[in-house]
Amino acid sequence: MVSRRLWSFLALPAAVAGVAAIALTTGMGGDYPGPACPGCDYAAPPIAALLHLDLSRLFAVQPMMGSFSLLLRVPAALVAKLVAGGDLLWQYRLGAFVCLLGPAVLGVALVRRMHGGVLPKLAVLALCVANPLTFAALHWGHPEEPLAGALCVGAVLLAGDRRPLAAGVVLGLAFATKPWAWLALPAVLLAAAGCRRTILAAALGVGGALTLPMLLGDPSRFLHQVGAFSVVDTGVTPFNVWWGFAHQGGEATVGGSAGATWSIPATLASITHPLVILVALALSALAFHRRRPPQPERALQLLALLLLLRCLLDPLSISYHHAPFLLALIASEAVRRSWLLPFASLSVSAIVWAMTRYVLPLDDPDLAGRVYLGWSLPAALYLGMSALGWPRGELTSPPWPAASSSSPLRSARDTTYLRAGSPPG
């Protein structure tokens, strides 16, 4: 039997090596080098501005994503400039490596909490480092997506460990990485036994410190990007609940490039993002109401549920948008049933891989949509019932396991709806 101390010693270098093997061999992410257009989420232009200390340019080309991952990738871009002559591919690879250290550290933290055998720990670590949705995020140029997911999950874990200041700081970093990270706030507060004001103050302080300069630097650009995130056009992919209302002939903009040929009624499109917020608030309120006695592990299931619903209710849901959901699902299984294999996470990963390999090449969006709803709706139902403690007998669960004290491109013919698949594995 491998001791916990030895696991702590071996897990981190293994995770870092795995991330390096993945990130340093990836191709150029589709959305990374693009133009600095309004409503776009390209990282290369603002990183280039930061490299040259051109703050006016940075504010003028700021993307929809927050500033944290951009700042995090600047040293990597500098190394690429010094070693590889500024090669954009190596800038992307090294930046992706830095971002993917977040899920790697999360995997190590989860392994240190687990009390099961070798196989469950290996499965959790491998899923955090190298799941199909991580490859999808790299393929489309968004390694900051799994980074934000890891930060959200980490904030829940820290809140459950009664470390409110650390939880708030990590949550604030998530806020400054992706706008959707605000969905994690109810789960973090649910996991906290107290000191919620400390969490809120730290999260708002850190998030605000990283966001306010972007607003003050170019208010017009900042507000335009916020508006682009909150307003949905009529385009739709098959990977959400709205596909049944789609009709051919519309055009969608995903990552700044138009290409979809399906749309939903404008009235329906206008309510989708507000609906995400309303559903998240309702489920969070219900989770707080039914939390008797306090059970922080439920917070991870609530987080996974809210991140999945964010995708289910978004007409332009894409594959890599699900990466944070999968990380939260992995964490919930590792925490609640640490002696078992994470069967739900393994199943979701296998289905996503199978969809990419066998379903998407058929170019049949209706079939792809049915397969997607075939696994995502049952997953949402399971997470909802479990997070809310239904049935009542399910309210009893194992104690929250504290961390150990020991030291630690697809081809150009693809249409936009195919962006909802991850790249061939």
Image (spheres, grey):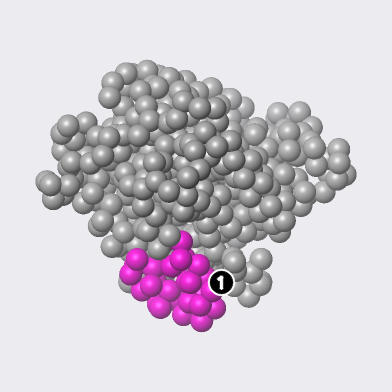
Residue 141, given in percent of the width and then of the height, sits at 63, 53
Q: Is residue 194 left or right of residue 101?
A: left
Q: Is residue 172 above or below residue 41?
A: above
Is residue 371 covered in magenta? Answer: yes
Residue at figure coordinates x 59%, y 40% from the top left: 10
Q: Is residue 234 left or right of residue 186?
A: right
Q: Which residue is mark 1?
A: 415
Residue 208 in sight = no
Residue at figure coordinates x 86%, y 38% from the top left: 82
Residue 48, given in percent of the width and then of the height, sits at 75, 39
Q: Is residue 240 left or right of residue 51?
A: left
Residue 270, given in percent of the width and then of the height, sits at 35, 54
Element at label 1: loop
Residue at figure coordinates x 53%, y 52% from the top left: 126
Residue 110 in sight = yes
Which residues make up the magenta segment?
348-375
Residue 350, given in percent of the width and then of the height, sits at 46, 66
Is residue 111 covered in magenta? Answer: no
Label 1 crowd (10 A; few <14 / some 14-19 / many >=20): some
Residue at figure coordinates x 72%, y 51% from the top left: 24
Instruction: Report the quarter where the C terminus lies.
Output: bottom right
Q: Is residue 149 above or below residue 266?
A: above
Q: Amino acid at mark 1?
A: Thr
In depth, the one of 118 and 327 nearer the eye is 118
